Image (spheres, rainbow, N blue to C red):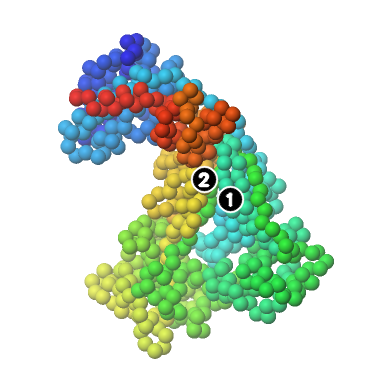
Amino acid sequence: MHDSVRVGVYVCHCGRNIEGTIDVREVAEYAATLPGVALARDYRYMCSDPGQELIRQDIRDQDLNRVVVAACSPCLHEKTFRHVLEQAGLNPYFFQMVNIREHASWVHEDRRAATVKAKDLIRAAVRRVRLHRPLERRQVSIHPDVLVVGGGIAGIHAALTLANSGKHVYLVEREPTIGGHMAQFDKTFPTLDCAACILTPKMTAVKMHPKITLWTLSEVARVEGYVGNYQVTVRRKPRYVLEDVCIGCLECIEACVYKQAKVPDAFNVGLSKRKPVYIPFPQAVPQVVVIDPETCIEFKSGRCKKTCVEVCADRKAIDFHQQEELKTIDVGAIILATGFQVFDGRRLPYYGYGAYPNVYTALEVERLVNAAGPTAGEIVMRDGRRPRSVGIVHCVGSRDVHTNAYCSRVCCMYSLKLAHLIKERTSAEVYNFYIDIRAPGKGFEEFYNRVAEEGTYLVRGKVADVYPADHDGRLMLQVEDTLLGMVRKIPVDMVVLATGLEPQADAQQVRRLFNISCSTEGFFLERHPKLAPVSTFTEGIFLAGCCQGPKDIPDSVAQAGAAAGEALALIDAGSIELEPNTAHVLAEACSGCKTCVPMCPYQAISFNETEKKAQINEVLCKGCGTCVAACPSGSIQQNLFEDDEIFEEIAGVLEYA
């Protein structure tokens, strides 16, 4: 031990978060008795400005050279207190934070036991911090370009915000066009303004912006590097139409040998058909057709007459030999805006989706009411009838422990919107079956009142069953009306399922690709739900839109702007300091077994064939400690987690208080 070490211990009340379960003053008095502790204090809010100033002043006046703060999670305020030490003239790594909130106060009801545990944790930290060594941060330069993954409204807004700030942006979208789900909507709540009128100008702005490189039918294949210097490989799938040559005349679609459209149209959610040569929708960006190799005769049999090629003979835009390309780009920051998928109504068979033709999902009805949809805005059911009565079932795939326990946030409002549009187009009786109406946004309550005043029936109760009512194709909805206190059976012509929002099917693969985390629901996990809602635990990677959790269009746009702002702040800094808690190889002890090389999730370890030793790139290393734990010879050590520090901490925990 170092006799010259003078430790200051500071115990935070954290309001009543800690003080409510732990006797903070007793803990501080105990800490003052520990070897090497020069003083110990408790304070209501250590992270506040007066709390920080208290530490700075004590370092100067009491000649402290080590500091322990017992408070909340280091994820939240470790950087805060390290900065305090730096301001006071100490190396910021002569600091140890003890989490007595999550590790003691919040997990115990017994005040005495929680207090004893807090003493144990602080004692361990005091013993450990005396062995801390001075470390220095490294600086790396930041590449000025940005990658945005996903071309929905969130990705579009983030890309335009960055491009308008002078940054070059790569916007990668795996569909043939940008626009996302918003492009499928007719109107948006609560103002009922045209979705296309809002969206398509921004789509065009993306295509025309000189600072944006737009790659559709593309996916990120590999991500390497580190914050400020990411190397990203993008797989560009063949469109079989040359984007630089095609002028969007659409004559090839008319000329296709398919006399009738036979392929289910994904953009219209299977409510219409398309040809193998198609454009997703009239306002698609880029305004370039695409050939579907899964259904095109030329790809299936090679016996097509190629009338599409003949009609495009002057421009020669069609190329059946086009191959997949891999493009590698360098970027300083990445914004993920990969969106959501809609809950599959077939997973709840008692609602009859897929079994009864006149049970629709909300997204299908969005296409029916859309003027550019398969019925030109006329609500005509699959059996050819116009509905005289419609039942809209809320919370399908949301707020249900058997599917998704979370609220999808948008379903109540879009259900009310659809009720208004259906009533407007058909004069049908419309029933909304809800658990409770959630309308917390600006103008939402007023929109709810408007729909109610229009004559929509609002029935509070969860639909238990949907089954045929008679021989006329009507459907019976059985529901317990909790306001009337009775079970009701209501016959309708058409059932609309307000399906919830889910993470994309490949969210886990994307998470691994970008080395970020997912929440228990499967959405990408933010660094902190309040203080860092668009950042991830991987520096330089940010989140925007529904990939982070269900949200409506205004919230998606707001989050996209925030993500763009964070990326802009990172890039404009010019360089970034990297934490020094990295691993290093003790070459004299390394046996060259290569166990550590495949274990590293950041590809930071390589094998030196000349010296037959492992070596670590400290810039790529994130200090996860995997290699340290895996090394059979113990030849890999990690700054801030040296063996002597860890053993001393363990001894401190086990020592009797």
Q: Position of residue 502 (x, y in %)?
A: 44, 59
Q: What residue is pinned by disc 1?
A: 220
Q: Is residue 90 visible?
A: yes
Q: Secondary structure at mark 1?
A: strand
Vertical placement of residue 22 versus 294, above or below: above
Image quarter of residue 30 = top left
Q: Secondary structure at mark 2?
A: helix
The residue at 49%/40% (across/down) is: 598
Vertical placement of residue 323 versus 464, above or below: above
CA–CA distance in space, label 1 to label 2: 10 Å
Q: How many labels were placed on the picture?
A: 2
Q: Nearer the viewer, residue 204 or 591?
A: 591
Q: What residue is pinned by disc 2?
A: 514
Q: Quadrant of the C terminus?
A: top left
* Residue furthest bottom as drawn: 471
> Which label is found at residue 195?
none
- Residue type at the position of mark 1: Val
- Residue type at the position of mark 2: Phe
The residue at 37%/83% (across/down) is: 468
Q: Nearer the viewer, residue 634 or 604?
A: 634
